[in-house]
Amino acid sequence: MDFTALITPKAISARWTAAASNRIPYIGESLFPSKKQAGLDLSFIKGSHGVPVSLMPSAFDAKLTFRDRIGLKELRTEMPFFREGFKVKEKDRQEILKFENSNNPYARTILDNIFNDADELIEGAYVAGERERMMLLFPEDGNVGIAIVANGVSYIYNYDPDGSWKANNYFELTGTAKWSDAANSNPMKDISTVKKAIRTNTGSEIKYVIMNSNTFGYLNDNQKIMNRFITKVGVANAYATEDEIKGVVEDVSKVKIIIYDKLFRDENKEVHGFVPDGYVALIPEGALGNTMFGTTPEEADLIANPKADVAIIDKGIAITKEVQTQPVNVNTWVSQIVLPSYERMDEVALLKVL
C-alpha cells in the first residue's frame, strides 16, 4: 500500500466533505454566505437607503425632478491571501515504508494522522474567514474593519473610511447604565433604544442580538430582568434558567438572543473567542453581505498542471499536493483568497455594555 498515493487533495477533500456533515457551522457562514469571483479585487456598494421618502409632487407638463441617491458608496480593495502547509519528509517516508507491506495495526493510525494535519489546515481556512466576519460584526473601538498582521504580512481594511458607521451605529454605555451594575442597568431598554435608532436611520428592523456567555451572564444577575421574571411566574426568589432569561428579554425587546462561544487560536496559538466580552451585536434578518473567495494561484495555474494535484473545497479553499524531488518530500498545503463584503453594515449596530 502506497501511503503517499492515498494522500491526494481529492481524497482529503472527500474525507473533509464526508466529515463536514457533523461539523457545527460558524455563525458567520450564514450571515455572510460564500460567493466566488475571479481575481483579487473586492468591490461592493455600501448604502443606507433609510426610511422611504415620499414621492415629490409635480405639476402637469413640468420638468422632471431628479432625486439624489441616498448614501451609496463603493468600497474597493484587494483581498488577502492565506497559505500554509505540511510535508512528509524523507525520514517520515521511511517510517511509513516500514508499515506498507505489513499488517501492523498502527499503519492506519499513521495515515489518519497525516489526514488530520490536512483537516487542521482546512479548518484553519474556515477560521480565517470567520475571524474576518466577526471583526466586522464586533469592532471593539467602533472602527469597522479587518486587521490581520502575522508572518511578515499586514492586511488592514477600513470599511468605514468617513466614520459614519461609528457615529450612527456604535453605542457605548457609561456609569450605572453598564450591565455590570445589576441594580441600575436596564438591558431591555438598551436593546430597544438601539433597535429604534436603527429603525429610524435605515427603516430596518433588528431581529437578533449576538453575545457570548460571559456577557449573557450579566443578564442573569440583572435585577430588572429578574423582577420581571418573578412577576411573570408569581414565585418570590424563583430561579431563572438561561431560556427563561432569554424569554424575558425577548418578550420586551422583541429580539432573539444568540449566544456564540466558539473559540479559535491565532497565529501565536493564543486562544480567543470570536465574540469579545462586553459587546452585543444587533442584526436584522437575512444575509449581511457575502464571504467572497478569489481565485488562488493554485486554482488558476496548477489545477491543470501535471506537476501538482489540486482540489477545491467550498467556493475557493484550494488543497494542493506536490512531490518535491530534492530533498524527496511530499508537500501538501491549503490556500485561499477570502474577504467579506458588508453591504448591509448600516443596518447593524454594536452595543458596548461594559
Image (cartoon, rainbow, N blue to C red):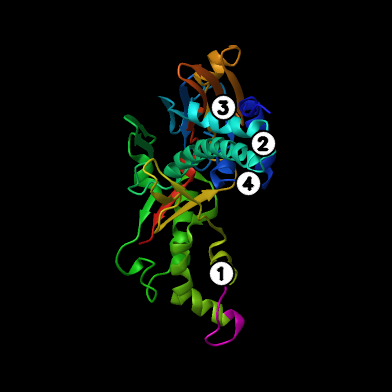
Distance from disc 3 to disc 4, alpha carbons, whole Å, reads: 19 Å
What is the secondary structure assignment of the residue under circle 2?
helix
Residue 42 location in percent, x, y? 47, 25
The disc, 2 or 4, on the residue closer to the chain's N-terminal end is: 2
238 left or right of 273 in image: right
Residue 302's place in the image compared with 264, above or below, is above
Instruction: Read off the residue under disc 3.
Output: 319
Residue at image coords 38%, 38%: 145
Instruction: Read off the residue under disc 1.
Output: 242
* Magenta region includes residue 240: yes
Residue 317 location in percent, x, y? 56, 29
Residue type at the position of mark 3: Ile
- Label 3 crowd (10 A; few <14 / some 14-19 / many >=20): many
The disc, 3 or 2, on the residue closer to the chain's N-terminal end is: 2
Instruction: Read off the residue under disc 2.
Output: 15
Instruction: Read off the residue under disc 4.
Output: 23
Based on the displayed image, in which of its 4 quarters is residue 208 positioned? bottom right
- Label 2 crowd (10 A; few <14 / some 14-19 / many >=20): few
294, 185: nearer the viewer: 294
Do callouts 2 and 1 mark residues in contact (Cβ within 8 Å)?
no
Residue 107 location in percent, x, y? 64, 38
Distance from disc 2 to disc 4, alpha carbons, whole Å, reads: 13 Å
